[in-house]
Amino acid sequence: YIVHKVVDRLKPEKPSNFEEQSFTNQVNYHEKELRRILKGTSASKILNLSERHRLQRYGVLIRKGRGKYVRWMVSERARDILEA
């Protein structure tokens, strides 16, 4: 619980240009997995924890639900890049 609070504080307010670039790179790097997620397999099954955290930090994956019923969704931003 405490860890979550610290992590929230570390999150940048707004993506800078560099982060935008980095966001695109993250999407490209994980494109295959993300496409699979777009087709409907849950992200939880596909990505290992550290990758999931990294993608979440860049706003590629979004948590939906809580507790046992958390699902990982691909953000609109990532979806746009993938479907472009």
Image: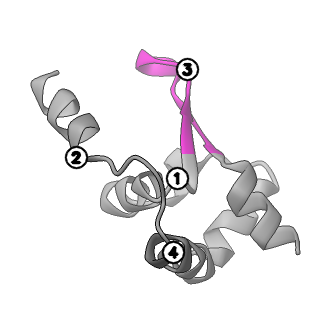
| Disc number placed over residue 17 in the picture, else none | 4
Given residues 6 and 18, the one toward you in this image is 18
**Alpha carbons under labels 3 and 4: distance apart:** 30 Å
Report which residue position mark 3 lands on. 65
> In what element is the residue under mark 1?
loop
The x and y percentages for residue 55 are 46, 60
Q: Give the residue type that dot 2 points to.
A: Leu
What distance separates the C-alpha of mark 1 from that of mark 3? 16 Å
Q: CA distance from mark 2 to mark 4?
A: 18 Å
The residue segment tinted magenta is 62-73
Q: Residue at x 55, y 71 (%)?
A: 20
Q: Which of the labelled discs sits on residue 10, or is there none?
A: 2
Disc 1 designates what residue? 59
First in sequence: mark 2 or mark 4?
A: 2
Residue 66 sits inside the magenta stretch: yes
In-image side of 75 versus 30 (left or right): right
On screen, 37 above or below 64?
Answer: below
Q: Quadrant of residue 33?
A: bottom right
